[in-house]
Amino acid sequence: MDNYKIRVAFIKYFGQAEMIVFAPGRANIIGEHTDYNEGFVLPFAIDQGVWFFASVNGKDEFNIIAADTGENSTLFPHQNASLIYGWEKYFNQVLMAMAASPLKGSDIVFGGNLPIGAGISSSSAITCGFVHLLNKMNHLEMSPHKMVKIAVEAERGSGVRGGIMDQYSIFNGLKNKAVLLDCRSNSHEFVDLDLDDCHFYLINTCVKHNLINTDYNNRRAQCDEAVSLLNKYYRPIRALRDLNTDDIPKLGNLLSDTLFKRASFVIQENQRVKDAVHAIKLKNFAQLGELLYASHDGLSQLFEVSCPELDWLVDYTLDDDIFLGSRMMGGGFGGCTINLTSGELNDEKINDLSDKYYDRFGINLEIIPTSPEDGILQKKTSYSH
């Protein structure tokens, strides 16, 4: 990704940057809404992301400019978060989460090529990148685990009760590998993604969503309620992760229809993650594709976080043999599908899909080829001296 625009903006406003950091977005092969249920996920860091150019300014303030829009903000440690909105709140929440650390005021320009609201963690890239930047600029020597924890705390402070998947994969991703993350122990193993001729594509519905203003937090509350009821009427569990598919038929009389659907999806999705890892190791990409379709069916019918645009994109792929699998990705209610194909999508295929989507919804979609890339910790932080 070219950082020329961000570099030029920094020179224009502040001069020469002392430090340059890149924070990738993330894709998730499978394992949706399982992270906050202490389950399993299978994400990878992608090559699209956010650049940060920065220099210490000798003041007790952070002057931050968004290169893509020209918006600017001046933030101070311990600032009242209730008065801060938009992208500024992510920077502010990081400053609040790191309030106990001695932080030097800085001038920062950031920007990149992560679509906002596409479900590929633009907000997490900002928070993780800023945490890493502050750690480096202030020589804090924080551990990777500590930085992930701060980034998670910062995003939760902005209103989303998410899990740890986004931040963990953005920091720890490795090129050509997926991260099998256990969201209970916060431990991981890398899974080789030797795809042969297969490819991953993200297809952006370009339907914008804001997780705070959707039912995302409501879904988490429903999962928590199901756990509480099952603890009382079924058996002691800490999270839905503690149940398996054999338990599902026994839960119908213990939960409302809605809670039963939510719990069933999470239990099944956890099993699909394990099955997906097995399929990848065997290079059984047809099976992996079927698991993606099954995941989407559950997200749409049981967890009810899809939308007409996402369902249409997945249905489109069913009629074309080059698509092995497809599902909605991210919190839901818009954003991207992740698609596994048996080869590259040619211009004819891309144009056909784009035209039909526009005819149906009057929206221009975005098709993004993607592959596993290094996370923040593997990227070289640049210094200018």
Image (cartoon, helix red, strand yellow):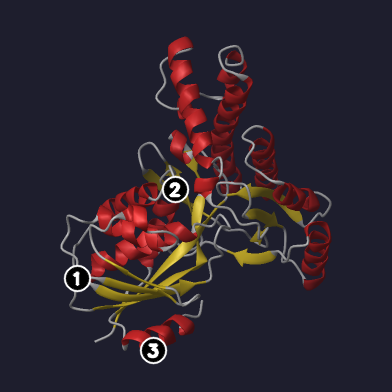
Check the image and report above or below for 253 versus 305.
above
- Residue at 64% x, 48% y is 328
- Mark 1 — residue? 60
Q: Give the camera-side residue of 261 and 266.
A: 261
User: In the image, residue 54 lies at what x, y percent?
Assistant: 31, 77
* 309 and 276: which is toward the camera: 309
Image x and y of residue 239, in percent? 43, 27
Provide the secondary structure element on which disc 3 rests: helix
Amino acid under label 2?
A: Met
For marks 3 and 1 on the same chain, the one whose residue lies earlier in the sequence = 3
- Kindly identify which residue carries mark 2: 165
Residue 302 in the figure: left or right of residue 349: left
Q: Is residue 199 left or right of residue 178?
A: right
Please name the residue shown 19% across and 65% down the image. Answer: 103
Label 2 and label 1: CA atoms lie apart by: 33 Å
Check disc 3 and report the residue beneath it: 12
Cα separation between marks 3 and 1: 22 Å
Image quarter in which the C terminus is found:
bottom left
Label 2 – label 3 distance at C-alpha: 36 Å
Residue 110 on image: x %, y %:
41, 73
